[in-house]
Every structure is written in C-alpha cells, then in structure tokens.
Amino acid sequence: MEDAIGMERIKVGVLGGTGMVGQRFIQLLDRHPWFEVAEVAASERSAGRPYEEVMEGRWKLDSDIPPLVAQLQVKECTPDLDCRLVFSALDANVAGPIEEEFAQAGYVVSSNSRNHRMDPDVPLLIPEVNPDHLEVIPIQRRRWTRGGYIITNPNCSTIGLVMPLAPLHKKFGVAKVIVTTLQALSGAGYPGVASLDIIDNVIPFIGGEEAKMEAEPLKILGRLEEGRFVSAELKVSASCTRVSVRDGHLESVSVELNQKASSEDLIETWEEFDPLAGYELPSAPSPPIVVRREDDRPQPRMDRDEGRGMACVVGRVRECPILDYKFFVLSHNTIRGAAGAAILNAEYLYKKGYLS
Ligand SMILES: NC(=O)c1ccc[n+]([C@@H]2O[C@H](COP(=O)([O-])OP(=O)(O)OC[C@H]3O[C@@H](n4cnc5c(N)ncnc54)[C@H](OP(=O)(O)O)[C@@H]3O)[C@@H](O)[C@H]2O)c1
C-alpha cells in the first residue's frame, strides 16, 4: 500500500504482537510513513484468529486497534511471513531461537528482547549514540545464509540512563555511575505484578534488571574496533525497584566525570545534543534530551509523553557530595524503552540503506 505522497511502504511483521510491547508496536506503526504492518505473529494460543478477537480484553492502550491490523489473522512465529522486516516483542523465554530462525531465513529482525543484545556480532543500537556499531552487521551476516540479521535495542531502563550519559561521556568522560530506578508496571508485561503486591508498596527487586543495566551501557558506549566490541571503561552500579506507576521509568543517577565540568556545562551538553537532526526519521525526537529546570520534574505522569514518548527528560541536576553530579531522568518504557526504540532503529537502517 502507498502512503499519501505515493511512496510504497515496506511490509513489516510484529512477532509477539499480542503482548504489552507488541500492541505498542501496532499502535506506533499505525499510519507510519515508511512501514506497514502486514503480519502479526504470536504463540499457538493466539494463532489462527483475527487480531481483534485475540485482543479482546487484552488491548490496554488509549487508542483503538488500527482497523487494518484488527482484521489480520494472527500467525505462528515461523519464518514464512510476507514481509522483509520483523519487529520482535517476544517473551524472552522463546525470543532467542525464533529470532535466529528469522535471521537465518533472510529477515531483518529489530528486537526488543534481551536474548541477543550482548552477542559479539549484534548491534545494541541507539541511533543517537552508537550508529557506527551497525558496521558489525556484515560480520553477523556470515552466520546466516540468506542475508538476514538481528539488531537490538537496550533494556527499558538502560536507554533512559545511556541517553544522558552518552554526550557527557563523549565530552568529559564518565568514570562511575550509581543509579536507582523506579520502574513502571507496564515494564512487567500483562498482567504483570499482582495489584495486591504493588498498591501501597515498592518492590526492591526486578529479576535480572540490575545485571542488564550494569552491562549494556558498557557495550553501547564502547568502541567497535576491527569488528570487535571494546567495552567503555566506566563502572555502573544499579539498584532497580518496581513502583505503582503505569508507564515511565524514573531513575536517580549520580556520576563521576573524568574532567571537571559545571552543572551548567552538563545542561548545555544535553541541550546541544541532537545527532539525528537533519535525518528526518519519523520517530526521532528533536531534541532527544529535554532538560526541566523546575524542582519537582521530571514526573512520570507529566513528562513520559515528551517527544511522543521518545525523548528522555532530565531534571534536578545538582552537585553530589560523593561523586560529581546527580540528576533524575525519565523515559517512557514501552515507547522509548521498547517499541519506539526498535522502530527508530529500523528507520535508521532504512535511511542508511541496510533494508535494501
Ligand atoms: N514491557 C516493557 O516495558 C519492555 C521493555 C523493554 C523490553 N521488553 C521485552 O520485550 C519482550 C515482550 O515484553 P512484554 O512486556 O510485551 O511481554 P508480554 O506482554 O508477556 O508478551 C509476550 C509476547 O510473546 C508471545 N509469546 C509467548 N510465548 C510464545 C511462544 N512460545 N511462541 C511465540 N510467541 C510467544 C506472546 O504471545 P501470546 O499472546 O500468544 O501468549 C506475546 O505476544 C520481552 O522480551 C521483554 O523483556 C519489555
């Protein structure tokens, strides 16, 4: 199908299209100028019925299911879908081998799942931060026979952390980071955490999350040297909590810098950061980092939709008596932290000719 300006849109599929992140993909891809959802796939429990029927009682977003997707038959996650690109929002228990099957069959896989993020030949991409990491794709393609490959986006709390760290690291060098997260309920999928466990409560544990937050930034901020990822030399210590917020992960961050800087230098660095300006990617926020100067921002309910959920909002920048500076950052976990990030990654691939 063509868009309003007559461009033939690229057919895409959504693996795990029935989950929390999967439905975000369907919502964000509605009327996308370059991509058109042609296939939705999930487990055999959902396969064989129209998407609208499968999602009865499960669609949790404010907008309605887009009519063209509502009619699609949900398929199983086998690599015989009529599309070139698949977004993966699969449960991590099954994502690993399914994504490999698709790459092997020649599909481009833009994945949200953790399974392949740390593979030595898979980019863990934030287009504003490490676009050069795509240069590892030709190496990965040697693993598959039909030209497919996998790219991944970071964990939903990693992305909120790395966005403000990246320009600081480039300009001043970041040596140490201590981060405590206050993570939203939608990050746990649906039905997620039982209401009786989370109302009037904070849960100081999210399985596997702290390890991801401590490892992923080192790969993303690291260098690609002769086809090998070299980790950035910084240390991250993370503590992750689940709080009673629907969407939007808030993080309290302290950083030690290698070079002296004032708090105004930090703010100026963030406000100048807009590396995708001029690329005209439909999902790219401009600017990607918004700095709030009020004492009581960012807040999940007020700030998570900044930049259509794709911007990170930083606030309360102040001196830290132990490290150098501390601040809060907020990012929308199912948009910038999941579906929106994978779509932006695919837009960047398209712009750079990796989808042809
Ligand atoms: N929620 C977030 O904020 C967030 C952020 C970043 C990354 N992620 C990652 O994104 C992925 C999806 O998360 P979610 O929160 O959307 O989970 P979810 O709501 O539990 O959805 C999981 C999806 O995987 C499908 N699935 C489960 N078992 C399957 C199987 N054996 N074969 C094929 N499909 C199967 C489900 O299909 P059925 O409906 O048919 O069961 C559903 O579509 C996870 O890897 C998660 O770690 C989530």
Image (spheres, rainbow, N blue to C red):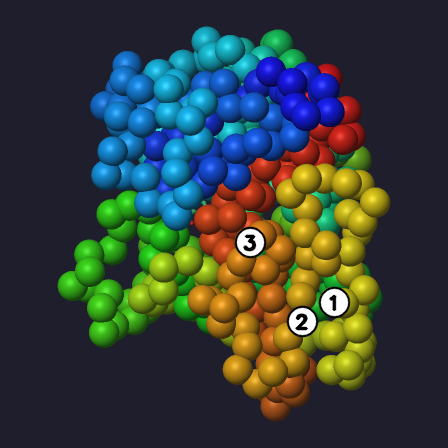
With respect to residue 137, does 282 lie above or below?
below
Asked if residue 91 can be seen in this view, the reply is no
Asked if residue 266 can be seen in this view, the reply is yes
Chain-order first, disc 2 or disc 1: 1
**Which structural element holds mark 3?**
loop
Look at the numbered discs 2 and 1 and tell me whether their residues touch, using CB distance below 8 Å.
Answer: yes
> Looking at this rendering, what residue extends furthest in the front direction?
4
Few, some or many residues within 10 Å of mark 1 (<14, 14–19, 20+): many
- Disc 2: which residue: 291
**Which structural element holds mark 2?**
strand
Q: Is residue 69 left or right of residue 221?
A: left
Residue 355 drawn at (x, y percent): 69, 22
Identify the residue at horizontal 24%, vertical 65% (top origin).
Answer: 198
Q: Quadrant of residue 293?
A: bottom right
* Front residue (pair 32, 238): 32
- Disc 3: which residue: 309
Amino acid found under the numbered disc labelled 2: Val
